Amino acid sequence: MPAKKQAKAAADIKDKLTVDNVKAMLIAQNFEMPAGYISEDNTQYLVRVGDKVTSQEDLEDMELMDLGIDNFAPIRLSDVADVAVVNNKKDNYCRVNGNDAAVLSIQKQNNYSTADVSKRVSEKLETLKKENPGLHYTNLMDQGIYIDMVVGSVLQNLGMGAVLAVLILLVFLKDIKPTAVIACSIPISVVFAVVMMYFSGITLNVISLSGLALGVGMLVDNSIVVIENIYRLRKEGVPVKEAAIEGAKGVAGAITASTLTTISVFLPIVFTTGLTKKLFSDMALTIGYSLIASLIVAVTFVPMMSAGVLHKVTEKDNRLFDGLQSLYRGVMDKVLRRKWIAIVLTLAVFVGAVIGATRIGTSLMPSMDSSQMSLTIEMPKGSGLSDTAAMSDTVMKKIREIPDVDGVGAMVSSSSGMGGTSSGSKADQDTASMYIMLKEDKKQTNKEIKNEILKKTKKFDCEIQVQESNMDMSALGGSGIAIEVKGNDMKTLRRTASDIAKRVESVKGTKNVSDGQEETTPDIHVTVDKAKAAKYGLTVATVYQQLSSKIQEGSTATTISQNEKQWDVKVSNDTKDNITRAQLKKMKLTGTKKGESREVALSKVASFSDTDSLSTISRSAQERILNVTAELEDGYNIGIVSQNVTKALKGYKAPAGYSYKVAGEMESINDTAGQVGLMLILAIAFMYLIMVAQFQSLKSPFIILFTIPLAFTGGLIGLFVAGKDLSIIAMIGFVMLSGIIVNNGIVLVDTINQLRDKGYELMDAVITAGSMRIRPILMTAITTILGLSTMALGLGSGAEMVQPMAIVTIGGLIYGTLLTLIFIPCIYLVFNRKKKRQRS
């Protein structure tokens, strides 16, 4: 044998250059790090060691080891391995409208508007399309388009509400001049609010604009009270300037208090956390700004303009209000003599409404219609990428048959979702995601389209889940039923989760119940016989190490930079491909016996059993958890079903050391409802303190607070009639309603107090005050109701989100306003029985 070959054989390169060694050498050679500093001539120098590989040629030429043999070149990577750039296209799947495609996902930076970024991206894509004739693109999801649609819808509702409010004023006042004065106050107040929003850093988003739309009906309330008082004095013959001053002065205290009470209901939002604060802080500030603006306009602009336009006031007969005032005086004369009957009946209706509220059902957010939907396809376990791709093509073809569908895109799912394309891993290849764009002039609702998709794909050998809207805000708090099961021992935990899932499955309204154990991986459990292994100098750990190195797939050793891109460098031993279970048992291990190296088959030192294990194991507070989940059948409410699930689990006792709790959407509902409840309690406290300061009394504000349960009764009735759930949006409506409804009580009680100060008898003061203030009270209520009417009807895109809030406010105002004029005088008499007024 030639000396060179003998030297090479003696060097035993095969044992020195294993896959693990090559990986370690790649990491060590492709290395650049600062080592420290040295000083010279008062200057510090950073010592940086090494450099990164920048090309495939450098990688191939990398020296792995030098054998130290004369005339024998050092061993390079290309001598022992094939270096190739591999295109992983076959490991990915992405198609749009039946054609191969690539997905580009673009996210905005925090300080930029979604709509603006979307618009600029669309313009850039159009430019690229013109520059590259072969380029085609399809929008699968564009939040900018949806935001523009919703903002446009809210602005339209705002404008329509303002117009309706002005028209009702014209009907009430029957005079164009005072109506024009109030009409001018709306845009001034809106501009003031927008300027304040700008300086507060609030953007014109769906939430803030909804605040403006909700507040547009209230913008005119203060101006109405002022102009009505001025107008009344002018008709009594008071000079115009004096009427303007005295008219504004007479109600300034009442409207200031009523405005502050309305604003104060939103002040507690600073004490809330989580979803409630994120969703409603912008709305609270916007409504607050607009109401402050309306107060300033009412006490400055309205008297000034009234002094200029109300020089001539002609007495106009208003048979409707004259008849209404006469009817009110007659009714109240009888009601006040039987006040306890009225009080008991009103409280009975309130209790009935509260009991009925438990049957309405709850939800986190109302479902929203949009032009974008999505779905996921889950193939049977063990399906490969080709099976998933073929099923995705079939499903896509069926979806494109639906007339209202504009475009469909599908891709192999990954944990990054829309934010990134598939990782191509085996764990991802049995799931695909689809994004569906609908036509803007679609004739079907998203729910109808969802049902049609499920009907067309019912017989397919896969599980399909459709999300009705990509913009559904209920996703913020999760969806469906979720029960978190905690424990340490995996076998007991899995058994407990399975028992709970069976109980959940028995509850009517649940479907697709999962015990969290579907995502399992088949295992071959290798049990090492320690005594037999020891005869060959092997331990469980050394068996694992040798087995792992032989069967482990190629892993990333390092990365190299080339042409401003990062490339993963994977090292794999191609002898491990397609190892069967029989080959696994025959696999040779290297050990020692009697001081000599020996090989032994794995089956000689180990036994084998088939099991399964969870693909992922989650932990919380250092305990293992499994999530039992269930979806809701169509037509069932999350709150009611969750209550039934809780009842079904009431008799179940988990093993010692194990626990479970209801999570998911119901947990979010309970947490957020608690925050809203805290807001309401603090809001009532703030309102009471403000009214105490205004009335210099503890009794009068307490009487006015009785208007709040009246309003809540009307709000609950409104939800029941409209068939809406008691969502978090509706709960915020109740908070806002509590601030609006007390305004009528403040005006009424303040007028009663003023009349009594003038010497009126108690009964006469109560009836006279009601008949005097019936017109401004009805006017302010009706303008607010009409201002919210377009939103309550759910007109336009995105209106579903604030629709429950508008319904609650309208229902509360209708019922609360009517009963305020009847119930509050009864309560006032109960708390002021003495003929001579004793101010507290």
Image (cartoon, rainbow, N blue to C red):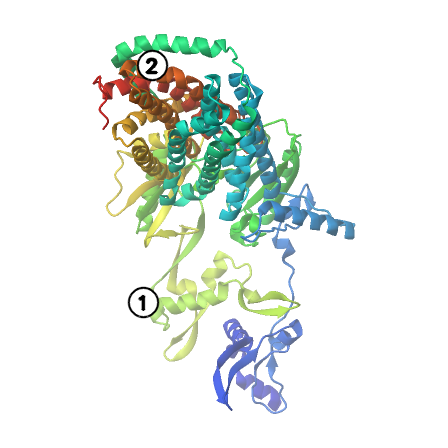
Q: Is residue 469 visible?
A: no
Q: Quadrant of residue 812?
A: top left
Name the residue tied to disc 1.
531
Question: Where is residue 649 shown, x and y percent of the image?
Answer: 30, 34
Q: CA distance from mark 1 to mark 2?
A: 102 Å
Say left or right for 269 vs 351: right
Q: Mark 1 and 2 residues: CB-CB less than 8 Å, in contact?
A: no
In the rendering, which numbered label is found on residue 801?
A: none
Callout 1: few (<14), some (14-19), or many (20+) C-alpha neighbours within 10 Å?
few
Mark 2: secondary structure: helix
Sooner in the amino-acid sequence: mark 1 or mark 2: 1
Depth check, mark 1 against mark 2: the one in front is 2
Instruction: Determine the residue positioned at 48% across, 28% down.
Output: 223
Q: Up-down: is 97 above or below 239?
A: below
Name the residue tied to disc 2.
767
> From the image, which quarter does the N terminus lie in?
bottom right
Instruction: Give, as a three-letter code, the residue at label 2.
Output: Ile
Question: Where is residue 85 shown, x and y percent of the image?
Answer: 65, 65
Q: Nearer the viewer, residue 44 or 25?
A: 44
Instruction: Determine the residue positioned at 23% across, 28% down.
Output: 840
Say left or right for 80 vs 693: right
